[in-house]
Image (cartoon, grey):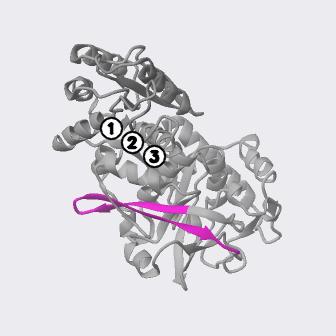
C-alpha cells in the first residue's frame, strides 16, 4: 500500500470558503484502493509551520508527497517543506481560476505552481506537474498514477532478489553492476549458489515435494510425454525455491537453469518458477537479474503475475514473445488448455509450461545497464491470435504500437518483461524520479 502525504499550501490573504472546500474535495476525489493518505488539517501558510509539518511527513515514513496549492502561495512556504522532503517523489497540483460569489475573483493556484515549479527546476528537484480542477479526471488520474509510482519506488528500495547462479550462456546483457543497481534502481541482489537450491531440493520429503503436483494440477494438465521422475524433481525444485525465498526474505528469484539444472541435475525449473510467480514471488530464469528487476517494476505497478520472454522474431510489425518454458499459469488465454509438456530437446531435461498467452494491450519493458548508468526501454503492443511455439512452448504474438525499425533498434537484449494494460505513463514518471533515461517505441 502506498503511503502518501497530501500537503495543502495556501496564502492567508487569498483563502476563501470556496478554496477550503476545493482542497477537501481534491483529497476526496483522489482516494483509491491501495493508497493511504495523511494530510494537514489547515493549509500551510508560513514557512515555519510548513517545515514542522514536513517533519511529521518524515515520521510517517511517506512514499511520496503531493503539494496541493489551494490558492496562490508564496514559494518560500512550499520550499520550507520540500527541502526536507526532496529525497521523496514529489508532485505539485494547482487549479485554474474558479468562480466565487458570481465572479472569477480567485487567481486559482496556477500562478502559484508555475512559480514554484520554476523554482524546483532551477534547483534540479524532480517533480510531477499537475494542473487541473479538483474534479478534472485527467488531473485525478495523474495523481493516482503518481501515488502508484511513488509506492513502487519505495518497494524497489526494499526489494530483495535472489540470484541462483549467474547469467547463463554468456548473455552479457544479463550481467550487471551490483552496486549501481542497488544505488540507482533500488533492489538488493543476493547471489545464491545453485548447490544451495539443489541441496534443499534433494532433502525434501514426499509431503514437501508432492505439494507441487497437487497445486499444479489445479492449473494445468500433465502431458503424456512427461518423463518418469520429472514431476518429482520439479516438486523438489518448487520446494527449494520457496525455502530459499523464506530463508532470505526474497521478493523475487531468478534461477540459472543452463546447464546445471537442464543437464547436470536433469530437470529445469520452468513449471516450478511459473507457479511461484502466480503465488506472489516474482520469478524468472537464465540468471538475468536486470529482467527480473524489470518484472518487479511491472508487478508493483500492475499487481499482476509478470512473465518474461525472448523477443524471438520481428516481422510485418509483429513481435513474437516466448520463453523457453516459463509462463505464469494466470497468463493463459484459455486456462483449460494449459499443459505441462516435456521440453522436447535431446540435450535438455524437464517439463515446460505449454500455454498461449492472453490477448489485449500489453506493455513490454526492460531496464538496461549502460556504461554511464541505466536506460529503460518500453512500449506497448496489441496481443494477437497466437499458436504455441514449435507446438509446445508458451508464446504471445503482438502487434507493435509504433515503428518496427525503431523497435528493433531499441533492443538491448532478447529478454523483456511484459504486463497487460498501458503503463508507459507510469514508466516515464519512474524514470524521471530515478534520474535515468528512457526510450519509448512509438
> Is 371 a magenta residue?
yes
Badge 1 local density, few (<14 within 10 Å), some, or many (20+)? many
Q: Report the residue marked by disc 2.
A: 131
Name the quadrant containing residue 328: bottom right
Mainly helix, strand or loop, the magenta region? strand
- Of the numbered discs 1 and 3, the one sitting upstream in the chain is 1
Q: Report the residue marked by disc 3.
A: 161
Seen from the viewer's position, the closer of residues 312 and 114 is 114
Badge 2 local density, few (<14 within 10 Å), some, or many (20+)? many
Q: Tell me if label 1 and label 2 are in contact, CB under 8 Å.
A: yes
- Magenta residue span: 363-385
Q: Tell me if label 2 and label 3 are in contact, CB under 8 Å.
A: no
Residue shown at the point (23%, 63%) measured from the top left: 371
The x and y percentages for residue 177 are 29, 55
- Of the numbered discs 1 and 2, the one sitting upstream in the chain is 1
Seen from the viewer's position, the closer of residues 151 and 145 is 145
- The disc placed on residue 110 is 1
The x and y percentages for residue 256 are 50, 60
Amino acid at each position: 500500500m502506498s503511503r502518501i502525504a497530501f500537503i495543502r499550501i495556501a496564502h492567508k490573504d487569498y483563502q476563501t470558503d470556496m478554496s477550503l472546500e476545493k482542497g477537501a474535495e481534491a483529497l476526496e476525489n483522489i482516494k483509491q484502493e491501495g493508497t493511504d493518505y495523511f494530510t494537514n488539517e489547515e493549509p500551510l501558510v508560513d514557512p515555519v509551520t510548513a517545515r514542522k509539518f514536513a517533519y511529521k511527513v518524515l515520521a510517517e515514513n511517506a512514499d511520496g508527497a503531493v503539494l496541493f496549492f489551494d490558492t496562490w502561495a508564496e514559494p518560500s512556504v512550499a520550499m520550507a517543506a520540500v527541502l526536507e522532503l526532496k529525497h521523496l517523489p514529489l508532485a505539485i497540483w494547482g487549479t485554474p481560476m474558479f468562480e466565487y460569489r458570481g465572479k472569477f475573483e480567485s487567481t486559482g493556484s496556477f500562478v502559484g505552481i508555475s512559480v514554484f515549479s520554476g523554482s524546483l527546476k532551477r534547483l534540479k528537484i524532480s517533480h510531477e506537474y499537475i494542473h487541473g480542477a479538483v474534479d478534472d479526471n485527467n488531473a485525478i488520474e495523474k495523481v493516482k498514477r503518481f501515488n502508484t509510482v511513488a509506492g513502487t519506488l519505495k518497494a524497489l528500495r526494499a526489494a530483495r532478489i535472489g540470484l541462483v547462479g549467474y547469467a547463463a550462456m554468456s548473455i552479457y546483457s544479463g550481467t550487471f553492476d551490483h552496486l549501481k543497481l542497488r544505488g540507482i534502481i533500488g533492489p538488493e541482489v543476493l547471489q545464491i549458489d545453485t548447490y544451495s537450491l539443489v541441496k534443499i531440493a534433494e532433502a525434501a520429503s514426499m509431503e514437501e515435494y508432492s505439494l507441487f503436483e497437487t497445486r499444479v494440477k489445479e492449473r494445468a494438465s500433465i502431458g503424456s510425454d512427461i518423463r518418469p521422475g520429472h514431476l518429482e524433481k520439479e516438486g523438489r525444485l518448487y520446494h527449494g525455491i520457496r525455502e530459499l525465498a523464506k530463508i532470505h526474505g526474497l521478493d523475487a528469484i531468478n534461477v540459472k537453469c543452463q546447464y546445471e539444472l537442464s543437464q547436470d541435475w536433469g530437470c529445469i525449473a520452468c513449471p516450478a518458477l511459473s507457479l511461484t510467480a502466480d503465488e506472489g514471488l516474482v520469478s524468472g530464469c537464465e540468471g538475468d537479474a536486470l529482467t527480473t528487476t524489470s518484472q518487479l517494476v511491472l508487478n508493483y505497478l500492475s499487481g499482476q503475475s509478470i512473465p518474461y520472454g525472448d523477443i524471438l522474431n520481428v516481422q510485418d510489425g509483429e513481435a513474437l514473445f516466448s520463453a523457453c518454458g516459463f509462463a505464469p499459469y494466470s497468463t493463459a488465454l484459455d486456462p483449460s488448455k494449459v499443459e505441462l509438456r516435456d521440453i522436447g530437446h535431446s540435450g535438455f531435461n524437464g517439463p515446460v509450461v505449454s500455454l498461449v498467452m492472453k490477448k489485449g494491450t500489453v506493455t513490454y519493458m526492460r531496464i538496461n545497464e549502460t556504461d554511464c548508468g541505466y536506460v529503460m526501454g518500453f512500449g506497448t503492443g496489441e496481443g494477437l491470435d497466437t499458436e504455441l511455439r514449435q507446438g509446445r512452448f508458451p508464446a504471445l504474438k503482438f502487434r507493435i504500437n509504433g515503428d518496427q525499425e525503431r523497435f528493433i533498434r531499441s533492443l538491448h537484449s532478447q529478454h523483456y518483461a511484459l504486463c497487460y494494460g498501458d503503463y508507459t505513463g507510469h514508466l516515464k514518471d519512474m524514470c524521471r524520479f530515478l534520474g535515468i533515461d528512457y526510450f519509448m517505441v512509438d
